[in-house]
Image (cartoon, helix red, strand yellow):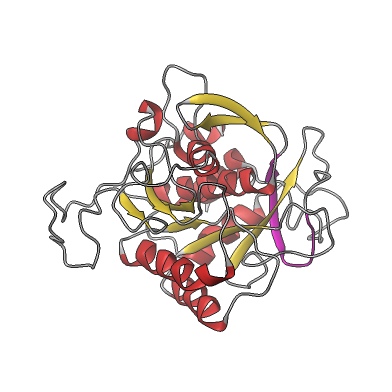
Amino acid sequence: ARKGWAASHGDPSVVVAVIDSGIDTRIPQLAASLWTNSDEVPGNGVDDDRNGYVDDVHGWDFRDGDASSLTGTPIHGHGTFVASIIAARPGEYPIVGVAPGVTLMDVRFLDSAHRFASSDWKTFARAIEYAVDNGARIINLSIFANARPPDYFEKAVADARARGVILVGISGNLGENQVMYPGKYKSVLAVSATDRADLLATFSNRGPEVAVCAPGDSITAFTVGGRPATESGTSFAAPHVSGALALLLSLNPRLSADEAVEVLESSCEDLGQRGPDPLFGSGLIDVGAAVERLLGS
């Protein structure tokens, strides 16, 4: 990432929506990166922009039906962890996101235990629609399901992609030979996880839908309360990819979703068998190489 930062730390006009368990927006290194809805007047109890969400200044909590992840039911640390990998600003702790200059939209969907029920698919679809309607260029989906989603959810995902939004998903954490939904969809960029030896992490699912891989084993980032923590999972590989794509869009806002993904995939470090494969996809993302390829093209 440091090589990429020589060209850009990310542009605040690039919005990455984190649909997850909520972001702890009290953390200074994350608060500075928050998306702000300029058409909404904070705290006046009025839906100023008439989008159906009152006071949605930094996003929307679809779990509690209010404007802040920090009111109502407690948030799980997962979303905060993901968000800090994408765009934590430099600060007191030596934790910084891949694209610290871009903007984070907080879209809470998961409950306090980092879960959702089969009855929540319509809410999940609305969360995606909200992110798209409010200008997200990238949606990070560090979520996987054990069953195939309903058709209307697949349509919401496909519609988002058709509108030029990049959806970054995960392969899953069961160590199985199948990519889980929503990462399994063609319209979602499925990410598997590598360990410190650039091998497939033991927990990472694999399959023909894997597009790229990224570090996901023993990752250090922020959890609720601003405390550093170290966690593992494909959930934490995906935000590395979201951050890398956000840097590319920062350097060339005219890039289409397909073009940005092509630059990223074509600059990966090939791992495993030669060429794309079910474990690593096109390979391990290389932010510096991706930026060089973009600027050299």
Q: Is residue 214 magenta?
A: yes
Who's the residue at 42% across and 57% down the image? 63
Residue numbers of the magenta segment? 205-216
Name, please, the residue furthest toward the front.
73
Who's the residue at 77% across and 32% down the image? 196
Who's the residue at 46% across and 48% down the image? 246
Residue 80, image x, y percentages? 48, 39
Q: Is residue 53 magenta?
A: no
Name, please, the residue furthest toward the right.
273
In the shown orientation, is residue 123 left or right of residue 70? right
Q: Is residue 3 visible?
A: yes
Q: Is residue 2 visible?
A: no
In the shown orientation, is residue 29 left or right of residue 176? left
Name the foreground residue: 159 vs 64: 64
Name the foreground residue: 14 vs 19: 19
- Quarter of the image containing the N terminus? top right
Count the labels in the image: 0
Residue 274, image x, y percentages? 86, 56
Residue 112, image x, y percentages? 51, 47
Name the foreground residue: 281 vs 81: 81
Task: Using the image, determine if residue 166 lies above or below residue 290.
Answer: below
In the shown orientation, is residue 125 left or right of residue 15? right
Name, please, the residue furthest toward the bottom.
151
Residue 268, image x, y percentages? 69, 49
In the shown orientation, is residue 105 left or right of residue 239? left
